């Protein structure tokens, strides 16, 4: 049993899917988990409840991350309640599934603001209340480097996020803060159910993955948790692919 | 950050605020936001606008506008899991939705032929229309808790569309045309009234 105070952890998009698994992973270590959500309050409340059941302390914070003022309010609320922040997990993502040539400026701006700019503003605000040993971890996907049909806006936003990871890592290294990104392969979440032929796509990805199994949200959460640990202090500005080896082939 | 869940609203106040939220979320002219305007066909709303509108409704009224329920229902229609449940209830045969999706053309008639050939169900005259009718009833019941105003919806018209094509875009359009400015206002009013936050006589 450690005497260290519980870590304050902010997980954006922490109500569902990978974000929920990350929130629960930190809860198991007794963390004070700030669960941010956008519209699905019901799911976020369930995650907050489960955080408490697993030994963490949960706080629900609703915010629209495409609005910088909302992010500033979000981090200010974390500061008001916890006084500081140990780990920022920038997980929230939104997207419009369309070919690049069919995207409207509004759709493009929405996705870029939510998925890429949010990390910038979050890092600016969060690093202010972080001390040495602080961790910023973002979530990306294989669409940042590979072309996935209908994924143009999300893929490019993730590419921007990965580039930003490297710049932030260098800028924040002197303060003892690490910045890394976990690029997850396909994880079976409700996002896939919303996509036409999403189930068939998952089956094809499973078949092509060397181990024959999809990556799980818990496995991704485990890697995020590791990056937040003291053992990962020397990992800086990296994009860590967690896809079961899927991207190694062809 | 946290919505105001104490404020008491008047019906007129809700109407004005819903109009403003729609203008902000969709980026449309206020003059076009009439009570009868349908969000998708008249105001051009798309999925990201619904997210914005849901967020703003929660922040303004402390009321969840469950647009995601409509999306979830549409996914269940599209993947034929609703049809699978209807068929199981009628024929006592559980057939996975993904098997039904392999049937071509995507009509109830073709699905029933498939069921007769592969699962030995017994067909009777008129069963196709009855199955479509049961499907429509189930689909509309699934939408009852959403902000859609389904009053006066022509079930026969809806049934006609689905009889021709289980993935009928016209059927989806008919349903989505019921998502009007008035329907959203009334949904918020009902939620506020249920929470005791609608001014008496408002």
Image: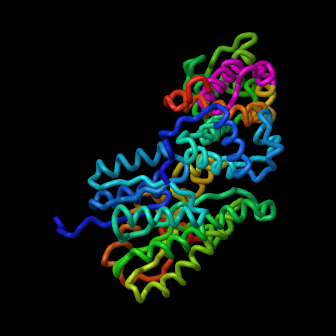
Q: Quadrant of residue B191?
A: top right
Q: Is residue A113 magenta?
A: no
Residue drawn at 44 percent across, 77 percent down = A127
Residue drawn at 55 percent across, 28 percent down = B193
Residue drawn at 52 percent across, 32 percent down = B197
Judge left or right: residue A7 versus residue A34.
left
The part of the chain drawn in magenta is: B131-160
**Colour treatment of the image:** rainbow
Dominant SS in magenta? helix
Measuring from the top left, give residue B187's x and y in whole percent. Answer: 63, 32
Residue drawn at 31 percent across, 67 percent down = A7
Q: In the rendered image of this protein, does residue A82 appear above or below residue B95?
A: below
Q: In the rendered image of this protein, does residue B200 appear above or below residue B72?
A: above
Measuring from the top left, give residue A187's x and y in whole percent. Answer: 51, 57
Locate the C terminus of chain B by quadrant: top right
Q: Is residue B148 magenta?
A: yes
Q: Does residue A184 appear in this view?
A: yes
Residue farthest to the bottom? Answer: A174
The answer to which of B18 and A219 lies nearer the viewer is B18
The answer to which of A91 and A155 lies nearer the viewer is A91
Judge left or right: residue B56 versus residue B179.
left
């Amino acid at each position: 049993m450690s005497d260290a105070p519980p870590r304050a952890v902010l997980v954006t998009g922490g109500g569902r899917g990978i974000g929920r698994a990350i929130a629960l992973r930190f809860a198991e270590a007794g963390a004070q988990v700030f669960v941010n959500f956008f519209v699905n309050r019901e799911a976020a409340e369930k995650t907050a409840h489960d955080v408490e059941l697993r030994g963490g302390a949960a706080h629900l914070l609703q915010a629209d991350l495409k609005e910088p003022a909302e992010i500033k309010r979000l981090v200010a609320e974390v500061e008001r309640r916890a006084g500081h922040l140990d780990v920022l997990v920038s997980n929230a993502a939104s997207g419009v599934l369309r070919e690049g040539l069919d995207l409207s400026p509004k759709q493009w701006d929405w996705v870029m603001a939510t998925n890429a700019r949010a990390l910038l503003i979050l890092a600016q605000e969060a690093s202010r209340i972080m001390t040495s040993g602080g961790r910023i971890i973002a979530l990306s996907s294989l669409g940042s480097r590979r072309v996935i049909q209908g994924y143009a806006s999300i893929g490019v936003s993730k590419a921007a996020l990965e580039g930003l990871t490297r710049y932030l890592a260098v800028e924040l290294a002197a303060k003892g803060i690490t910045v890394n990104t976990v690029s997850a392969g396909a994880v079976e979440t409700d996002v896939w159910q919303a996509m036409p032929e999403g189930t068939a796509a998952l089956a094809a990805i499973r078949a092509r993955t060397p181990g024959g199994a999809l990556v799980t949200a818990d496995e991704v959460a485990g890697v995020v948790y590791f990056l937040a640990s003291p053992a990962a202090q020397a990992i800086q500005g990296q994009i860590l692919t967690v896809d079961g080896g899927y991207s190694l082939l062809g | 950050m946290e919505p105001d869940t104490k404020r008491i609203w008047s019906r007129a106040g809700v109407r004005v605020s819903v109009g403003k939220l729609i203008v902000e979320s969709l980026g449309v002219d206020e003059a076009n936001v009439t009570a009868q305007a349908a969000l998708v066909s008249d105001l051009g709303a798309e999925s990201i606008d619904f997210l914005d509108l849901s967020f703003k409704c929660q922040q303004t009224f402390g009321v969840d506008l469950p647009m995601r329920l409509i999306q979830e229902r549409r996914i269940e229609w599209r993947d034929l899991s609703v049809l699978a449940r209807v068929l199981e209830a009628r024929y006592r045969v559980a057939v996975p939705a993904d098997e039904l999706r392999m049937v071509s053309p995507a009509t109830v008639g073709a699905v029933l032929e498939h069921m007769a050939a592969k699962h030995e169900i017994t067909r009777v005259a008129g069963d196709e229309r009855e199955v479509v009718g049961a499907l429509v009833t189930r689909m509309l019941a699934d939408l009852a808790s959403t902000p859609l105003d389904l009053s006066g919806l022509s079930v026969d018209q809806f049934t006609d569309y689905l009889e021709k094509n289980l993935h009928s875009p016209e059927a989806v359009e008919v349903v989505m045309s019921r998502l009007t400015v008035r329907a959203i206002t009334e949904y918020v009013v009902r939620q506020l009234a249920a929470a005791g936050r609608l001014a008496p006589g408002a």
